[in-house]
Amino acid sequence: MAAPATKSEELEALWARHTAEWRDTAQIASFWKDAEQTDPALLKYKVKGQFFELLASLKISIVVSREYEHLLLCLSAQNGKPAISYLPLPHPSGVAVDAKNKRVFVASTRNPNQLLEMRPLSGFLSRLDVNIPARADDSLMITRSLFLPGCIYMHDLALINGRLHGNAVGHNAVISLDFEKGFERVWWPKCIENRKVPVFEQNHIQLNSIAAGRTLADSYFSASSTALEKLRPGHEKYPVDGRGVIFSGKTREPICTGLTRPHSARLSEGRLFVDNSGYGELCLVEGGRAEPVAKLPGWTRGLCIVGNIAFVGTSRVIPRFRQYAPGLDVEKSICGVHAIDLRTGKSLGSVRWATGNQIFAVESMPMSLSKALPFALERDSEKEKVVFYAFQTDSCAKEKSMKPHKSTSAAKFGRSSKTLR
């Protein structure tokens, strides 16, 4: 029988475990210890039609948040082939793209909430201790994170007049967001006022998306209800069919009714679109009515519009919430993103995940801004270590030379990325 470990040996084993922990770049980038364990099966996909050819012709990438699988994805076409990359995040929801200032914002809605700022990789710091890549790709890198109270329950994100806004679903309000000042409630519908005092203390109406106009008054907002009631969104018996609305930012009153769990309201060239989730529809709102443009095979949520093409997300229906989807065949609902021609309502192509579950946001960004997230389907841990060790973005102070000088390269000194900790 082996002799029992001494106190010193027990401490050495404990410290060795501590030393080995938090080594994976995905863990550090997402503040999430289990991020290294992303199941590859979640990323396997099938393509129908000309989906990636469309991305190439439009010169865009698509950012998709799959909230229940804790994944942010980037879909792009590179060298004529489909390219999908990812970043593990706790329950990502809204995404907003600020192409002018080369920023992408993501809401992470576990408790506490986080607001993340991402910028494209622009180069590398000069180093002697690792082999720096000859050139940088434009992967989005996290550059800032703001922690916010979990009761905000952030959903959609949008830029209005250059300022970032979000749905504070837990407050029945829209908030402005600032990395220095935090959040401020700036808009809410009249229906949450009790004797002219707004009720911010709990979620009553599921105010969940922003169709961003030039100002708050020019914008529109979707919600599942207009009533302060005992039963609230999230309760399995909460009635939803036909109670959803679109609010006017100017009047704070509904301008469209009869929807069922609407999401992802969007303005495009003066036209207002919305996902009527409970019926799997993409709708155009005109004259106070939501007219279906396309019927899709799942819970519609996530929408961006580029020209005459709408990119729409569909999700499976969570079994305990099947009553929220009276217009869907729950068993046949799929997780995917579909390119819809707004002129005909026809699907031009789609990408689908057989093991996928819930999509929240679908947002486009110019391919010139970025075509990828930091992690590929087949991970290269050594490359990742170097990228995160020495990355620069345009928000960082750049050195005059982005490449190490030949006479002082890491290779000359015989060092490699294995030295990274």
Image (cartoon, grey):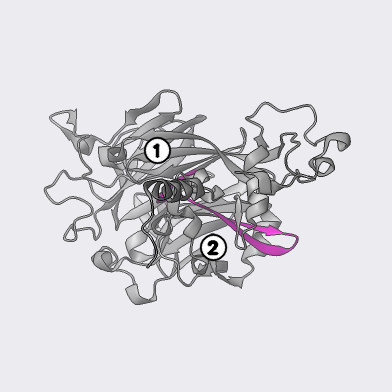
For label 1, the SS is strand
Residue 204 belongs to the span the image colors magenta? no
Can you give x and y, in whole percent of width and height, for residue 329 in the image?
Answer: 34, 74
Give the side of residue 362 with respect to residue 412, left or right. left
**Magenta range:** 74-95
Provide residue 63's location: percent of width, then percent of height: 55, 52
Q: Which secondary structure type mostly characterizes the magenta part of the structure?
A: strand
Q: Nearer the viewer, residue 273 or 165?
A: 165
State the mark number for residue 88.
none
Pick out the residue farthest to the top: 181
Residue 80 in magenta stretch: yes
| Earlier-in-chain disc, 1 versus 2 | 1
Whether residue 383 is visible here, answered yes or no, is: yes
Around disc 2, counting alpha carbons within 10 Å, would you say few (fewer than 14), some (14 to 19), or many (20 or more)?
many
Q: Position of residue 365 (x, y in %)?
A: 60, 47
* Label 1 with label 2: CB-CB less than 8 Å: no
Residue pictured at 27% horizontal, 51% vertical: 224
Where is mark 2, residue-wise? Answer: 340
407 vs 386, left or right, is: right
Tell me which residue sits at (37%, 52%) in the image: 263
Q: Nearer the viewer, mark 1 or mark 2?
A: 1
In the foreground, 389 or 203: 389
Q: Secondary structure at mark 2?
A: strand
Q: Quadrant of residue 51?
A: bottom right
Amino acid type indicated by mark 2? Ile
Please say if 145 is above or below 15.
Answer: above
Q: Is 248 on the left or on the right of 346, as rendered?
A: left
- Image quadrant holding the N terminus, namely bottom left
Picture disc at residue 166: 1
Looking at this view, name the residue that lies furthest to the right.
407
* Mark 1 Cα-neighbour bin, 10 Å: few <14, some 14–19, many ≥20: many
